[in-house]
Amino acid sequence: MNVSLEKKIAVGLGAVLVLLLGIGFASYWSTTDLINREVRAAQTHQVRETIEHLLYLLEDVEDKQRLDLLTGENQYLQSYRGAGHRIDDVLHNLTDLTRDSQIQQAHLLALRRLIDLRLAQLKETIDLRDAGRIAAHEQIVRQHAGKETMDTILMVLGQMRDQEQVLLLNWSKQADGAAAFTYALIIGGTVVTLVLAIGGGVLILYDLSKRRQAEKALRAGQAHQTLILRTLPVVMYSATPSGDFGALWVSENIEALTGFAPRCFLEDSSFWASRLHPHDQKRALMELEKLLQESSLATEYRWQIRSGEYRWFRDEGVLIRRADGTPQEIIGLWTDVTAQRQAGEVIRRQADIINQIQETVISVDLDGYVKSWNTGAEKLLGYPTDEALGKHISFVYPVEDREFLEREVIDPVKANGTHQVEVRRRTKSGEMRFAQLSLTLLRDDTDAPIGIIGYSMDITDRKRVQEALLTSRNQLAALAVRLESVREEERTRIALEVHDVLGQALTGLKLDVAWVYKRIAESIGLVEPSAALSRLASALELLDSTIHSVRDIATALRPSVLDELGLAAAVEWQAREFHTRTGIACETTTSPHKIVVAPEQSTTLFRILQEILTNVARHAKASHVHIRLEESDEQVSLQVRDNGRGITDVEQSGPNAFGLLGMRLRAQQQGGTFDIRGTSGTGTTVTVRIPLYRPIDD
Amino acid sequence: MINILLADDHPYLRRGLVQILLDAFPGAVIGEASNVPEVLAHAQKQRWDVVVLDLNMPGRGGLEALHDLKRLYPSLPVLVLSMHPEDQFAVRVLRAGGAGYLTKDSAPQELVHAIKTIWKGGKYITPNAAELLAAYLQQHGDSEQPLHCSLSDREYQVFSLIAAGNTITDISNQLSLSVKTISTYRSRILVKLDLNTNADLARYAVQHRIVE
């Protein structure tokens, strides 16, 4: 609980006053009481004196009566009469004095009767004497009775005295107590009051010194603040929240910053606004207008200082409102940030450059979470920066490429520092985009890696063209191969038809014609030539040559040896045929001696061999050809080596290399490879390899 | 009296041939077959002095028939009469055990002459075929290798395992290859060894002491 010093003092003073009042009252009450007791004590003394006086009066009366009796004079009558009055007075006096004691009143009541009785006895005795003389014994009796009464009176009086004595003792004891209490009260009260007063005084003194100290500290603090305000490069101000936003107060250090004294700002309310840079004026004033709604502001603008130079100032202000909510004033800080701006400008310009690059520039931390995202990335990938920041970079990669991303993109750059890779990324709209990505590992001052920055070049269009080209090339190749195989089938069919149907029929016809010829020859004998026979003979010749032609045509279309005896036999036959036709020596090596390959593979290899041999005959100028046909577990290979001039690179890739292309396509169609190497002057070697088992088989 | 089995799928041609043969060998018994099973059936039914075999027949070709005939009746002389020129088939036919090779465009007299030669137990080889045979021997030598020499290492391995009684699944487990691959190996082995069944394989293996 915190109670102010003033209150403490007031409460203390109140307490002291109450205490003093209490002490006064108690003292007064005690003294009064004491006085009363003294009065009572005096009264007791008076009572006792009065009792003594009464006793004296009674004895006086008795004495006088006795004298009367002795002397016979009536002196007593006189004294009796007088004594009666005086005793009454004394009794009244006593009654008054002992009014507050019922016992004494009761005693007095008894005493009055006894006294009355005694006085009556005395009078009676006198009266008797006056009337005639009473007998002596009677007188003695009477005297006895009077003595008894007198003894009782004395006893009552003794009791009264004792009672008064007791009262007196009592009173004096009470008076002693009261006096002691009063004494203690006064002493105690005075001590407490003194303690309180001294405590209060000390407290006040202590507080006063503390206040003095605080004031001193405050003064020192103010001086310090003033010093700080004067030396700080930050100007504090308060301004009107409307119009030109004229200053209401500015800290003195404004002069150090601007060259203008505070009064320049205070005297001319438009001073601040008038020196804003023309380019920034509108914006700065607008920002201040906005402050009226938003209650706080932080803006930067250029402002012309006294030297005429425009410097950048940062203005941070808050709006103070009145209780009813209307704007009261703006208070704020005003800092010259030109130096920071200049330093920041370089960085900003660099960031701006990155941001303006039309390709994606993305940086991630070592765990792959996006740290920066430029405008190019926004445009190309469709995700705004605030959406992309903090996400794992895999969010732009298709799900099936996530592993690729770790293994082929992130890991290599961590290992090598830089890395280039082609990736595909999915835009927000779901479109797939291809990019050539160039990555660099970012490092901090201590060379420790802190992240990865990736610059990408969009190659989607190129990729699309490439893909389209590849697809179309594949289609063309497939078409070519298909055409080739259709042609092969066609040739096989025609060869078979020609050979079997036409050839056999001709052969049968020939047999018949030969038979007819023989019969005619036998019947007419060989004596003279017959016109019919010679016609038949020429018909037979024609048939023979026709059969030969048919056979040659069929063989040219598709040698039946290939189908009947297999590739090795066909190759050997082809080699012989080539030798016969061209005169070029042709050697074949087959390993192992029996080769088993699928019909399409045979056809492919055989047709390639025919094409190679045709090329050798046409272009190679070779004198020797070696054909090697080999089968291994995995593949069958055909190698044709000649000793001719050697094919040149131009011939290999020139516009007339359709033959080579056709061979290569045939080999590829079977999942194989086609390889041709020429060495000038040494010859050409063609190697075709075809896998025995296509991957699709397993 | 001569028994001639004429195997040709062409009835018109067969008729011409029969005529020529009957002219040359009056009273000869001439059997006719138009496909390989018929040839084999005739061969089984009676003894023939000469079989005249066309190479082009529907179904399995004449060369297959030749192989079968020589395996079943090694002493039966077979003259191959073919549309195909000698340079394509003559050497093969002779090596497969054919008694002679004639092209159909040869003169009928030559056929008769050839049959006569073969009937006497000889071989009929045209000068052209003789030249080819000589060239072949020059190139390949006389050493006829056993068929299993044409197997590749892996095929030989699979062959041994099959001959030893392993199933395809066993082998695929053993060699860590798919069942399909082993099956392909097996079919290639059968083709290379001119065999049809696993039992044939096992018999071949035992004959050639590939498995004990």
Image (cartoon, helix red, strand yellow):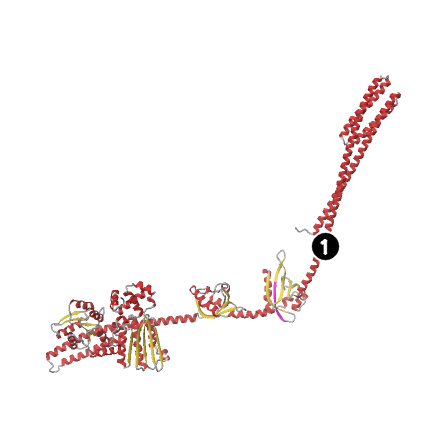
| Image quadrant where one finds the C terminus of chain A | bottom left
Relative horizontal placement of residue B161, taking residue A274 as reference (left or right): left
Which segment is the magenta one? A309-316
Judge whether A117 appears above or below A290 on screen: above
* Nearest the eye: A235 or B63: B63
Identify the main secondary structure in magenta. Answer: strand
Judge whether B107 appears above or below B37 on screen: below
Relative horizontal placement of residue A564, taking residue A682 as reference (left or right): left
**Tag 1, which chain?**
A
Q: Quadrant of residue A556?
A: bottom left
Relative horizontal placement of residue A630, taking residue A363 as reference (left or right): left
Q: Quadrant of residue A73?
A: top right
Q: How many marks?
A: 1
- Residue A156: image location, x then y, percent: 79, 27
Q: Secondary structure at mark 1?
A: helix
Q: Quadrant of residue B154?
A: bottom left
What is the crowding at mark 1: few (fewer than 14 residues within 10 Å), some, or many (at least 20)?
few
Q: Is residue A482 visible?
A: yes
* Nearest the eye: B37 or A633: A633
- Residue B205: image location, x then y, percent: 26, 67
Q: Amino acid at mark 1?
A: Leu
Relative horizontal placement of residue A170, taking residue B211 as reference (left or right): right
- Residue B148: image location, x then y, percent: 27, 70
Judge whether A140 appears above or below A2 on screen: above
Q: Which residue is mark 1?
A: A208
- Residue A535: image location, x then y, percent: 16, 80
Query: Does the stretch in magenta take in A54?
Result: no
Q: Is residue A251 visible?
A: no
